[in-house]
């Protein structure tokens, strides 16, 4: 099924600069403040290519995309970026502390080129919808630079741990690349050039299906660009560079595979009324006021405990938090039009019942992020309510088994249903089509 190849990556020359000065988080995780810090850190920081500053005088001939292409050309010709002499897979390890805990974990993956497939081929599966504007932005960048700077985060099933065991043996020596990012995540990379090992790994992937964890927009951009190039050539050249995209392949059984919840904040909703919300929600949920002055546990701890036996939310209001536990029969009836795989999913119940039915926010408005703000950090979500937001809903994360089953069934989840942590750094390795 999955067809993967080694490749000659472009990499920053560590003799000329520090890797920590030039790599970045994925483009869609870079805030304006982070963008400014990256710009200050180095004149060769990758942000200048993947999320450059727009200028007031930008036009069709001179803009963020043309500047990105110029930076890439100049850095390659000046030796700041050098291409590896021979093709390789790249073992990628991330060591991190799981947010909200003191638990330390490691996640290992394989950076490789993966053949681009239409979803209908049944090889690559998505679990969320994409938006037209980000797709257009990434496509313009790809057209201008003809290069991929970040990897698609792909999951595959390896219950026996065969591939993980093979990769573990490759990471016994000192890594060729090592960098600590701004979230205290240690990223290390080892090239795998042994031809026998490369063939063995390729064979192991022949029967694998791939699930996009992060990078839906970039994958669909690569797919669109592939189709453009096919149309220009008037033929399908199976092994042309545009037929592949850079991926990091990670087993979904990995102990280091962490999914964080993304909490929802409702703000600026003119019809919001706390009492009406609680009254309407009571039809679907058992509701208990949380008195944190007498509870020794935090709201998120109570939420996690309640979620072990069913769907639960914490609604944070200005008057205090409320624990909501789903009345399963009533909720299932209310979600009769939703597929059975999704009815028990926390984020689906939150969207379809609390946001749409109880608060009256339409599906289209949610999709356009009207009155809805997404926040990973529960403390920040609570703080936003104190600052004037209507209400915040804290939720537990989706389980990988739920995401897998829904995706492999050809279904998609609501936006921001998953937050895989940590993110894959951009700029560790680059795939240039030329």
Image (cartoon, rainbow, N blue to C red):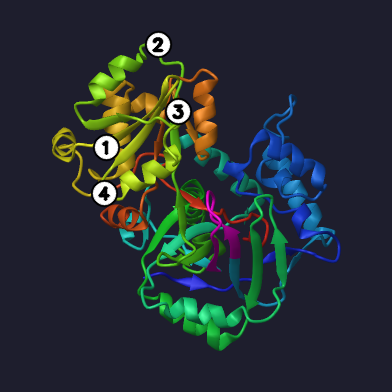
Q: Is residue 124 left or right of residue 67?
A: left
Residue 13: percent from left, percent from top: 80, 64
Would you identify the image quadrant in which residue 358 lies? top left
Q: Which residue is mark 2?
A: 270
Q: Earlier in the sequence, mark 3 or mark 1?
A: 3
Marks 3/1: CA–CA distance: 19 Å
Which mark, residue 325? Answer: 1
Q: Earlier in the sequence, mark 4 or mark 2?
A: 2
Q: Which residue is mark 4?
A: 309
Residue 292 shows in the view:
yes
Which mark, residue 265? Answer: 3
Label 4: element kind: loop
Residue 301: percent from left, percent from top: 42, 44
Which residue is at a point 73% across and 44% down the rendered structure image? Answer: 48
Which mark, residue 76? Answer: none
- List the single residue furthest toward the top: 270
Marks 4/3: CA–CA distance: 25 Å
Please name which of the two marks, 3 or 1, marks the residue nearer to the observer.
1
Which residue is at a point 28% across and 57% down the rendered structure image? Answer: 405
Please name which of the two marks, 4 or 3, marks the residue nearer to the observer.
4
């Amino acid at each position: 099924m999955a067809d993967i190849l080694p490749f000659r990556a472009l990499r920053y020359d560590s003799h000329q600069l520090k890797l920590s000065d030039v790599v970045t988080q994925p483009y869609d995780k870079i805030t304006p403040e982070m963008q400014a810090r990256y710009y200050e850190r180095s004149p060769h920081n990758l942000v200048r290519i993947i999320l450059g500053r727009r200028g007031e005088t930008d036009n069709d001939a001179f803009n963020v995309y043309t500047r990105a292409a110029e930076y890439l050309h100049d850095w390659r010709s000046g030796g700041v970026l050098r291409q590896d002499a021979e093709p390789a897979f790249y073992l990628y390890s991330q060591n991190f502390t799981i947010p909200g805990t003191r638990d330390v974990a490691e996640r290992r993956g394989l950076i490789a080129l993966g053949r681009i497939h239409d979803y209908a081929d049944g090889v690559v599966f998505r679990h969320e919808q994409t938006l037209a504007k980000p797709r257009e932005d990434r496509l313009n960048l790809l057209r201008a630079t003809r290069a991929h700077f970040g990897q698609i985060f792909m999951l595959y099933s390896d219950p026996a741990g065969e591939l993980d065991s093979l990769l573990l043996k490759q990471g016994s020596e000192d890594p060729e690349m090592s960098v600590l990012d701004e979230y205290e995540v240690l990223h290390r990379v080892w090239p795998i050039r042994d031809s026998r090992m490369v063939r063995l790994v390729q064979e192991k992937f022949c029967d694998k299906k791939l699930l996009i964890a992060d990078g839906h927009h970039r994958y669909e951009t690569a797919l669109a660009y592939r189709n453009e190039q096919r149309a220009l050539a008037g033929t399908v050249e199976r092994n042309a560079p545009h037929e592949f995209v850079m991926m990091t392949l990670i087993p979904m059984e990995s102990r280091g595979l962490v999914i964080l919840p993304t909490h929802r904040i409702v703000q600026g909703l003119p019809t919001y009324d706390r009492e009406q919300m609680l009254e309407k929600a009571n039809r679907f949920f058992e509701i208990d006021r949380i008195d944190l002055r007498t509870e020794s546990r935090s709201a998120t701890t109570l939420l996690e405990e309640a979620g072990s036996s069913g769907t639960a939310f914490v609604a944070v209001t200005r008057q205090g938090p409320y624990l909501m536990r789903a009345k399963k029969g009533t909720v299932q009836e209310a979600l009769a039009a939703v597929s059975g795989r999704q009815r028990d999913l926390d984020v689906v119940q939150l969207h379809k019942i609390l946001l749409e039915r109880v608060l009256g926010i339409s599906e289209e408005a949610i999709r356009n992020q009207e009155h809805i703000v997404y926040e990973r950090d529960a403390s920040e979500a609570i703080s936003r309510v104190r600052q004037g937001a209507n209400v915040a809903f804290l939720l537990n994360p989706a389980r990988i088994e739920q995401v897998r089953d829904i995706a492999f069934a050809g279904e998609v989840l609501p936006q921001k249903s998953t937050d895989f942590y940590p993110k894959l750094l951009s700029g560790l390795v680059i795939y240039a089509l030329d």
